[in-house]
Amino acid sequence: MPVRPALARDADVLRSVLLEAYNWDGEQRFTAEQLAADPHAARYLAGWPRGGDFGVVAETDAGEPVGAAWARCLPEDEPGYGFVAPDVPELTLGVLPGHRGRGHGRALMEALIRAAAEGPAPVARLSLSVEDGNSAVRLYTSLGFTRVGRNGGSDTMVLDVRTRAL
Ligand SMILES: CC(C)(COP(=O)(O)OP(=O)(O)OC[C@H]1O[C@@H](n2cnc3c(N)ncnc32)[C@H](O)[C@@H]1OP(=O)(O)O)[C@@H](O)C(=O)NCCC(=O)NCCS
């Protein structure tokens, strides 16, 4: 189950994954066009990769991308849904339909956490937002994320990367 660093040329893969994350419950709440026109969604990917961004892509053995996770710091006046502080990167995770339930999501999260701990500019914490009803919360909890707040109908969760990396 290969996982590799996300590169500039992966922007389209990340965009597909962002769409999956926005439509996590299987309802097509956003089309690709709506997502592309949504200023809030743009915060997660505009200019990928910007300084400080880091991410990972999961591929099939044949090299076909099937999912990705990445993290980016956002400013307080243009935050993400899982904002906790401007120096805490917020992550986005998704596996394409048809490839779920085979361990890619967990492998992506573990690789992203390693990248956060061991990358060129190690980060102390990672945050995320998970909407009520999304079973991804079980994955996050099992990795050590804890709930630190609420934003609308979603939990904001944080992982202390240093504690987990020990
Ligand atoms: C969440 C998501 C990334 C998980 O990826 P995945 O490759 O399916 O997950 P994995 O096979 O690695 O499973 C990881 C854990 O997730 C949980 N899980 C996975 N599929 C599940 C399902 N259908 N129902 C309940 N729990 C599930 C399990 O707890 C599993 O734990 P395990 O590793 O001990 O078995 C994927 O389902 C997805 O892309 N969903 C849509 C987008 C989304 O919700 N993104 C996150 C937004 S916060």
Image: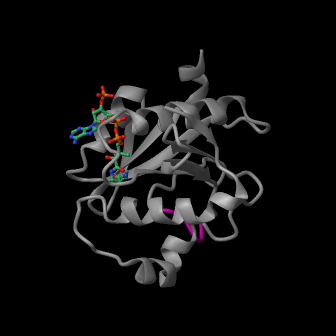
With 134 as the anchor, is 63 left or right in this view?
A: right
- The chief SS type of the magenta part is loop
Locate residue 117: give its quadrant.
Answer: top right
With 116 as the anchor, is 35 left or right in this view?
A: left
Q: What residue is rendered at 70% in x and 69% in y?
A: 47
Q: What residue is rendered at 48% in x and 31% in y?
A: 1
Q: Position of residue 61 (x, y in %)?
A: 51, 37
> What's drawn in magenta, residue-wise?
76-80
For residue 134, above or below residue 45: above
Residue found at the far top of this picture: 166
Residue found at the far front of this picture: 62
Q: What residue is rendered at 56% in x and 45% in y?
A: 63
Q: What residue is rendered at 42% in x and 27% in y?
A: 144
Q: Is residue 33 magenta?
A: no
* Closest to the observer, 108 or 89: 108
Quarter of the image that includes the C terminus: top right
* Closest to the observer, 80 or 27: 27
With 11 as the anchor, is 101 left or right in this view?
A: left
* Closest to the observer, 69 or 151: 69
Locate residue 106: give its quadrant.
Answer: top left
With 46 as the anchor, is 50 left or right in this view?
A: right
For residue 2, above or below residue 77: above
* Closest to the observer, 74 or 42: 42
Ligand 1 picture quarter: top left
Q: Position of residue 83 (x, y in %)?
A: 51, 56
Q: Position of residue 87 (x, y in %)?
A: 66, 49
Judging from the image, the colouring scheme is one colour
For residue 9, above or below residue 59: below
